[in-house]
Amino acid sequence: MDNRSARPDRVRRRLLAALAGAGLGAALPNARAASATSAWQSTFAPFDGPLGGSLGGGFDGSLECPALPVEGRLPDGLSGTLYRNGPARMRLGATRYHHWFDGDGMVQRFSLEAGRIAHRGVLLRTPKLIEEEAAGRFLYPSFGTAIAPALPVLRPDTINVANINVMTLAEGRELYALWEGGSALELDPETLGAKGFKKWSPETAGAPFCAHPRIEPDGGVWAFGYVPGSGHLLVYQLSALGALRRQAFIELPQADMVHDFAVTEHYLVFLLMPLVYESQATYAGSFASHFRWDAKAPLVVAVLDKSDLSVRRFELPADGLFHIGNAWEERGVIRLGYVSQPEILTVIQGRGLDAPYAADPGATTRWKEIEVDLAAGRVRSVATGIERVEFPRFDTRLTGRTSPLTVLLERSPAMPAAIDGHDSVLAVRAGGCQRFRYGANWIAEEHLFVPDRSSTHPEAGFLLGTAYDWQAERTALSIFDARHVDGGPVARVLLPYGLPLGLHGQFVAKT
């Protein structure tokens, strides 16, 4: 609908009403009207099984809506492409994955241009998917699910599902689907078709490449890879065009699982938790089952100097984490934020689709800030009082620089305990927080900050994020004014189908 002449507050009221109730529109004819206890299963069920047919009658590997009706008005300063990635297919033959991180990757693309939004989603045809599709069953052990009988894994990319994040280079002309146990998978930015695993150098062919590379304001990229049990990290430095500038193998004990890191103007910062990988442990044959928690070890803050990659080590009380926000230097002090998740061992070994991994999945997560005083050789952790959160994002134009805004997902007390996830988006600034709760029946996914290119105000921009209505089994993409998040979305599209609950994404502005 076209609301160009409508008052902004009236548009917001209409969108809030739509989010709150039946204004979502009718569900698909074959929708099962999932309950809270089956919400997680419902998001993946349409993508299970061998490829063929169309959604609802056998998924053929792709979805497409060339034109979605926009509720509200797409802002003038917002034009480009939102890519998102996450696990999708959870069942093949008689075997079903039970862990969220296991499924074959599926990349979503939302194209925003000239007041219109289109969607395309593609299940990634990795070598693993092609081989298992031909066999009619899962063949290899996964992150959290044991497979029996299983074939031996001869190299990491044998089981690379490319299902965590995406990375864009060369102003969006190159697109990669990222895992973290193996190579980056190059994709066609338009069709989303897989083009093959990227080899940054002959020495690093097939080596792990992280799910959270950091792209600096000049377009240069820092990334890393970890090999559990090796006591080392592989560090990559790439140009804005993807050329390898530097690679180094750094001795760094306690780096058995490193999902994220941060960069400042002069340093790389890793938070190394006391999660120990035991390759010879007699556990079930999944990757996650080989970890144990060393409660006597600290959380190590490793600061690497960009000039020579020398390491300085600091220690904090033991803590777990997946995600880190932005970091910057301020008069000799490095400041950064991260989501504390002390129950991370429970999360990685039991984040199932059949039941929540804890009675209250979001209760123990906290947004913490760390200050590293390099001159004094001290580090301290600062509590913020912000709890039940995950998936931090910020204005990536300010990577490694002071940034006033952190965007988080928040779990409200009203969210059913049977559902693992979040239902609110939270904008955190020094002056306080703004939040928007999607309401009953919704699971919110990561929200990104995108600058408003029509404004000169440094904080002008939008939050873009998807959310899944588990009762109607449909996904919505919402757009917020980043300075007025609590006012609700200014525009939204509702897909005629639900998408599998994903992990991370990136936005590429139209040039």
Image (cartoon, rainbow, N blue to C red):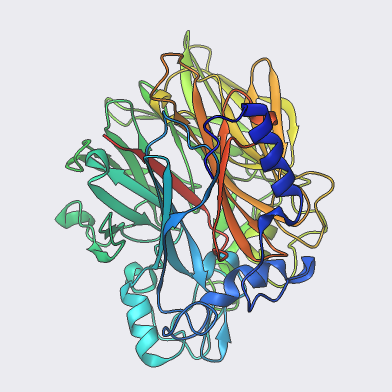
Which of the two residues, 188 or 68, is positioned nearer the viewer here?
Answer: 68
* Left or right: where 256 falls relative to 397: right
Residue 145 position (above or below residue 509): below
User: Among all residues in the image, which is located at the extreme front?
Assistant: 5
Quarter holding the N terminus? top right
Q: Residue at x 27, y 32 (%)?
A: 219
Quarter holding the C terminus? top left
Q: Residue 462, image x and y in percent? A: 51, 31
* Left or right: where 102 falls relative to 234: right
How many labels were placed on the picture? 0
Q: Report if residue 115 is visible in the image.
A: yes
Q: Residue 12, image x and y in percent? A: 66, 34
Q: Residue 158, image x and y in percent? A: 34, 74
Residue 491 position (above or below residue 160): above
User: Among all residues in the image, which is located at the extreme top?
Assistant: 331
Which of the two residues, 119 or 373, is positioned nearer the viewer here?
Answer: 119
Q: Residue at x 59, y 62 (%)?
A: 291
Residue 479 position (above or below residue 470): above
Residue 287 position (above or below residue 187): below
Q: Residue 246, image x and y in percent? A: 21, 39
Q: Residue at x 38, y 92 (%)?
A: 135
Q: Report if residue 212 is visible in the image.
A: no
